[in-house]
Amino acid sequence: MAKELKTNAMRILERAGIEYGLITYECDEFIDGIHVADQTGVPRELSYKTLLARGKSGGIYCYVLPVEEEIDLKAAARAAGEKSIEMLHVKEIQAVSGYVRGGVSPIGLKKPFPVFVEEEAELADKIYVSGGRRGTTLSLRPEDLAAAVGAQFVHFCREDGGFTEK
């Protein structure tokens, strides 16, 4: 049965020799990262969500940030070297990423998009990200995530501490 549970993200980590932990939970439809953290018992500050955005140039960018934080679009655009970015429309997520909303992992995206991880993640021993399907969370060291996807650690969260719950 373990073979059936494997996602593309897990296979990529295994091929790279990166250790990870796996948490599964019941989830038939989209629930936000805050509810996933609460349901799985993962501290919210260590639970990260994956957001996709399109730059003014048309490039796609992946942002990995704590579930209680909100992206600062100007800071995120600067990180990507863009004049501006806008969040991908929900209807585009699966076609662009290969993942369904609520199951988007920064690991194993359909194409190798630039990935940015909120810099505070570097301070954690491990963080939790989507495993590539709803109901699957992976834990791994932030530096291992960065190595697996070529991510950069930068600051792009709002300073006012606001968060978006969708």
Image (cartoon, helix red, strand yellow):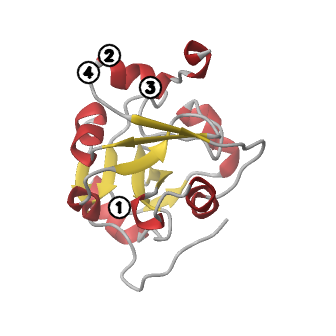
Mark in the foreground, 1 or 4: 4
Residue pointed to by mark 1: 77
* Mark 3 residue crowding within 10 angstroms, few (<14) / some (14–19) / many (20+): many
35 to the left or right of 105: right
- Please tell me which of labels 3 and 2 falls first in the chain: 3
For label 2, the SS is helix
Distance between the alpha carbons at the discs numbered 2 and 4: 5 Å
Q: Position of residue 37 (x, y in %)?
A: 55, 58
Relative depth, front residue between 34 and 104? 34
- Please tell me which of labels 2 and 1 falls first in the chain: 2
| Contact (Cβ within 8 Å) of mark 2 with mark 1 | no
For label 3, the SS is helix
* Mark 1 residue crowding within 10 angstroms, few (<14) / some (14–19) / many (20+): many
- Please tell me which of labels 1 and 4 falls first in the chain: 4
Distance between the alpha carbons at the discs numbered 3 and 2: 9 Å
Q: Amino acid at mark 2?
A: Arg
Q: Position of residue 103 (x, y in %)?
A: 60, 41
- Please tell me which of labels 3 and 1 falls first in the chain: 3
Above-or-below relation of 35 to 140: below
Residue pointed to by mark 3: 10
Q: Which residue does the image show at 78% across and 42% down from the upper left?
A: 28
Would residue 146 be visible to someone looking at this image? yes
Distance between the alpha carbons at the discs numbered 4 and 3: 11 Å
Q: Amino acid at mark 1?
A: Ala
Distance between the alpha carbons at the discs numbered 2 and 1: 32 Å
- Please tell me which of labels 4 and 3 falls first in the chain: 3
Distance between the alpha carbons at the discs numbered 1 and 4: 32 Å
Q: Which residue does the image show at 23% across and 54% down from the upper left?
A: 153
66 to the left or right of 15: right
In the rendered view of the protein, which quadrant contains the C terminus?
bottom right
Q: Amino acid at mark 3?
A: Met
Residue pointed to by mark 4: 17
